[in-house]
Image (cartoon, coloured by chain):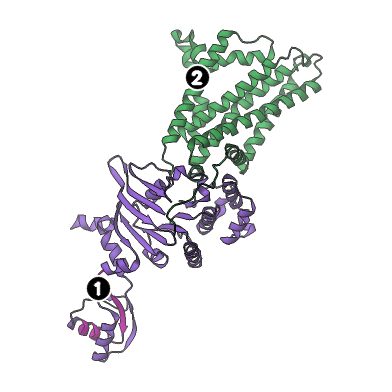
Chain colours: A green, B purple
Amino acid sequence: MSMTLDVSGTAQIPFTRLVSVELRKTADTRAGRWLLGAIVGITALFMIIFFLVADADERIFGNFIGIASTPQGFLLPVLGILLVTSEWSQRTAMVTFALAPSRTKVIAAKTVAALILGLAAFVAAIVIAALATVLGGASEGFEGLSAKIFLLFLALQLLTVLQGLAYGLILLNTPAAIVTFFVLPIASSIVFALVPFLRDVAPWFDLGTAQQPLFNSFGGDQGLTGEEYAQLLTTSLIWIVVPFMAGWARVMRAEVK
Amino acid sequence: MIHVEGLTRTYGGFTAVDDISFVAQPGRVTGFLGPNGAGKTTTMRIMVGLTPPSRGRVTIGGHLYHDIPNPGRHVGVLLDASAQHAGRSGREILTIGARTMGLPDSRVDEMLALVSLSPDESKRRLRNYSLGMKQRLGIAHALLGDPSVLILDEPANGLDPAGIRWMRGLLKGYADRGGTVLLSSHLLHEVEMIADEMILIGRGKIVAQGDKKTLLERGGAPSSLVTSLDNTSLATALQGKGFSVTAAGEGLKVEAPAVEIGRTALEAGIVLTDLRFGGAGLEDLFLELTSDTQREGHIEGASA
């Protein structure tokens, strides 16, 4: 009997297949379906509350989008975190990496899957916001809309998803990653607000401060200045890209148990 | 088919796997046997790339596991039947595996039927599975891709006697068709009945390997278990011939082949009610070979 294994006839697992499996994993448990449902449901709920309490002339599309960004900013990162950490808490990483030994490909597939879900949440928010604006009766509800608003909102969503993934990859532990995700930015903002010599440089180092102009731009028509874009870039680098790379490196080296 | 070459894994100052080398051949069931914490699981995790080795390497059919494309189609792996999402149904767990490997969903039904999980049970969430059901599901998962190599860590764990017999038949048949099977266990009896080849490991080191016959020849004199109507006289007669006799349950354990005991009883005119092979040859060997690695042994050694 042959001692060698003929693998010439076997194709590599296509990346798209890994992505579709990762998407499937987000919705094949009760907890997963609840989270996905909650993201859409709570987004809608926030908009309905705003719809009911806001004056008619405030019910414009930009405001609805701004309202949607709050709950989605909370919940989408949790989705990203769980996509990574549940593999470790449920120990399915052993099976995942045995079937797909290229950890880089698996992490990339998870990232793409998370971004697709972020995109879907964005589309859902746009649809609900448009519906609310049509029903809302503000005569110029869609006025002053630019593609820029959509893109900024989408960029913000996707960045928070990536941030969730990054903390998940670094900590590989659901509660720790969720707590870190929510507490660290607050702690950072407090430090940068309280320490006088840090206050001036806060927009360059504090994610919350740098993202503030982004939120403000939804309701009004003023865009971001070049400096504000640069600040978004540096803070995203510090708070999202660097942790993501560190987390990636950790998973590459980790012993899977 | 599985080549382990000078494999070592250390954790700080602790050596979990210490320079082990062995081969698991195709067409044979290779048993990987050792007490708890001997390094069996670590070795198997290194085989499939979940743990990086400190030194040495493992090849499967001449390839590093990492280099095998779509490895589930070639190597079936079951390391821990409980390492699945508790909230997924058994069917869903197999479906994810089948999708990853690019297999049709019909393969899931085939595997569920093979391991005798009913359609009803397959829809239950894993957290509601008994250990035996998890183990069946894990075996189904390992066999999904119709692999030619199987790596199974404690596959009989949690199976009832009928389940163990079923698994034995399954793996034997699998090896007879040319497959390579490596399975680990801490229970000698389990491995003895199924394995063609045995690797004995204790505290990270291989202490013996070979087929059952070779190992038994190393085990020294065979022993027998005997019960008679007059054990006291029988013991005296046997000791008179120089055999070592110890009480064992209602009878005696004698360090002699059964034929010698039968002859002694005949000469002494004692009626035997039970006489059989002590069967402990391998067990003695196993305990002896791993004695300095057994937890119990350590305690004895410390008090001596």
Residue span colored magenta? B219-238
Mark 2 nearby-residue class (10 Å; few <14, some 14–19, many ≥20): some
Residue B112 figure quarter: bottom right
Callouts 2 and 1 on one subunit: no
Residue at 63%, 56% in the rendered image: B109
> What residue is disc 1 on?
B221
Give residue B194's position: percent from left, percent from top: 42, 65
Nearer-the-camera pick, B253 or B113: B113
Amino acid of disc 2: Leu
Looking at the image, residue B72 lies above or below residue B266? above
Where disc 2 sits, the SS reads helix
Image side of residue A53 versus residue A185, left or right: right
> What residue is disc 2 on?
A237
Any magenta on residue B225? Answer: yes
How far apart are labels 2 and 1 at the CA level?
72 Å
Marking on residue B234: none
Residue at 55%, 42% in the rendered image: A13
Residue A254 figure quarter: top left
